[in-house]
Amino acid sequence: MQEARTDRPDLTDRPDRRIRAAHTETTVTVYQAYAPALGLPAARDGRFPAAWKRERMTWIKPSFLWMMYRCGWATKADQETVLAVEITREGFDHALRRACLSHYERGTHADHEAWQRSLRDSPARVQWDPERDLHLNPLGHRSLQLGLSGAASRAYADEWTVSIRDVTAMAREIHGLVRSGDEAAARALLPVETPYPAPPLGHLGA
């Protein structure tokens, strides 16, 4: 495995690519949405059930509103249960340090082959998508989506997870307030997401 380049810029330090999340000194909260058959047992037990496929890549999102965009305020099929998953910062940072961008980016990678090598070697993938406002319209800065596979996916489910909460009711309440035009009340219910002091991302070059 080749080491990450040390002369590249830290992309988490760019104003348009800054991780914002609800976090404490030891944990960070990410969001996922599942069908009730999987999401409800996970929230009830505070851990992912055996039915959660640990061999598949899973995408976690620190942005609540980007999760709302993805799941349509918990209305899309098999995404009716929104989970707030509190994980250790140690695990989250571990994944970031070993992450590779999910797509080739000129200027970040030496060439396309270097990116493909990094992609093969990395257990985590980073994708930057436009952040969303209360109406789920795109904003000028981007939000992190972090894909975990292999050992990182298993560690997320069985080692890094501290707690799992069902926040579907909160999502629907916020959506209802937005639809009624009470944006101030809707905004007051949003999770407080502040810039996260992330380590430099990992295998972005070769």
Image (cartoon, grey):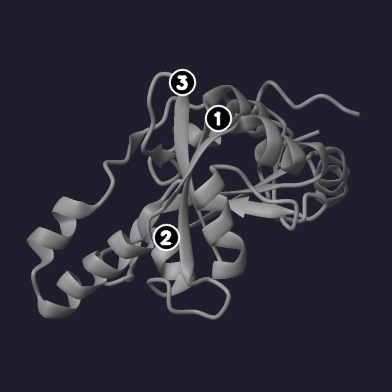
The image shows residue 134, relative to residue 96, as above or below, that is below
Residue 53 in percent (x, y) is at 77, 56
Label 2 close to label 1 by CB (< 8 Å): no
- State the separation of the CA atoms marked 3 and 2: 23 Å
Residue type at mark 2? Trp
Residue type at mark 3? Thr
Q: Which mark is residue 54?
A: none
Identify the residue at horizontal 42%, vertical 60% (top origin): 66
Residue marked by disc 2 = 66
Identify the residue at horizontal 12%, vertical 78% (top origin): 180
- State the separation of the CA atoms marked 2 and 1: 23 Å
Residue marked by disc 3 = 26
Q: Badge 3: few (under 14), some or many (20 or more) residues near its Cα, within 10 Å? A: few
Identify the residue at horizontal 74%, vertical 26% (top origin): 5
Residue marked by disc 1 = 10
Residue 192, image quadrant: top left
Say which of marks 3 and 2 sits in front: 3
Q: Secondary structure at mark 3?
A: loop
Residue 2 in percent (x, y) is at 88, 28
Label 3 close to label 2 by CB (< 8 Å): no
Identify the residue at the far right of this view: 1
Q: Badge 1: few (under 14), some or many (20 or more) residues near its Cα, within 10 Å? A: some
